[in-house]
Amino acid sequence: MHFDVKQHLGAVERSVSSPDRDGRAARAVTLSRSYPTDIQELWDAITRPQRIPRWFLPISGDLELGGRYQFEGNAGGVITVCEPPSRLELTWEFGEFVSWVEVRVSEDGADRARLTLAHIQHTSDHWSQYGAGATGVGWEMGLLGLALHLADPAAPKPDTAEFAASPDGRALMVGSSEAWGEAAIAGGTDPDTARARAGRTTAFYTGSDA
């Protein structure tokens, strides 16, 4: 699998903010990417249970308002808001940790639609160690998978392990981690702290030494 790393890195807008959630300090990692499709098709790709595994992970459960979902080998939770074709919110429960995901789909000019995803989590030791990239890089890989799926919906999903081990895959993860470090700095994090966290995130995703 070969693709334009620079183009895909440049396609994502990243931001990091510090909202309150339920009266506690939290961090929000927000990604936005435009796709050459319409909002109905984009909404269908991110909500139809038959399509989600083609670009993300196998999913089970009741994919409706109030329903509980489970991604295979990953998080599960409850769908708390579902307003087709523009707004989706859910809890993101992994082990003992609960965070929140908010998704918006909107028109983005002629024949384009934009997906904006915010993942909000309370501050934690995990954030102190890895920062925004731990969440941001993972979601960015998901948005890449979505781009490939929308470009060719019938194509099989690329092998995740092969992608991660490939030169392009590693370059994308390194570039994404560094970009999230810079987004954290823009969001108010001390530069040395943000870049140290980005280095640990890069090491985690690539298997290299921090």
Image (cartoon, rainbow, N blue to C red):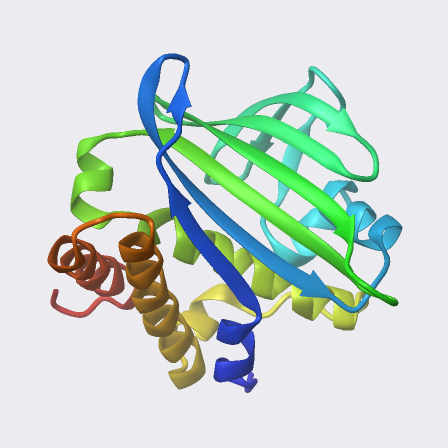
User: Which residue lies at the image location 22% right of the left edge and 30% below the top edge?
Assistant: 124
The picture places residue 180, in percent across and down from the top left corner, at 35, 59
Tell me the quarter of the picture where residue 58 sits: top right
The picture places residue 174, in percent across and down from the top left corner, at 32, 72
User: Which residue lies at the image location 59% right of the left edge and 59% below the top edge?
Assistant: 143
Quadrant position of the C terminus in the picture:
bottom left
Q: Is residue 103 found left or right of 21 in the rendered image?
A: right
Q: Is residue 62 above or below residue 194?
A: above
For the residue pair 88 and 192, the one nearer the viewer reads as 192
Quadrant position of the N terminus in the picture:
bottom right
Q: Is residue 61 found left or right of 12 in the rendered image?
A: right
Q: How many marks?
A: 0
Q: Is residue 3 above or below residue 193?
A: below
Tell me the quarter of the picture where residue 178 sits: bottom left
The picture places residue 98, in percent across and down from the top left corner, at 40, 23
User: Which residue lies at the image location 53% right of the left edge and 39% below the top edge?
Assistant: 72
Regarding residue 160, the answer to whether it shows in the image is yes
Tell me the quarter of the picture where residue 202 sits: bottom left
Q: Is residue 1 above or below residue 13?
A: below
User: Which residue lies at the image location 28% right of the left edge and 68% below the top edge?
Assistant: 206
Q: Is residue 23 found left or right of 87 in the rendered image?
A: left
Q: Is residue 61 found left or right of 45 in the rendered image?
A: left
For the residue pair 185 and 103, the one nearer the viewer reads as 185
The picture places residue 61, in percent across and down from the top left corner, at 67, 26
Regarding residue 146, the answer to whether it shows in the image is no
For the residue pair 177 and 96, the one nearer the viewer reads as 177
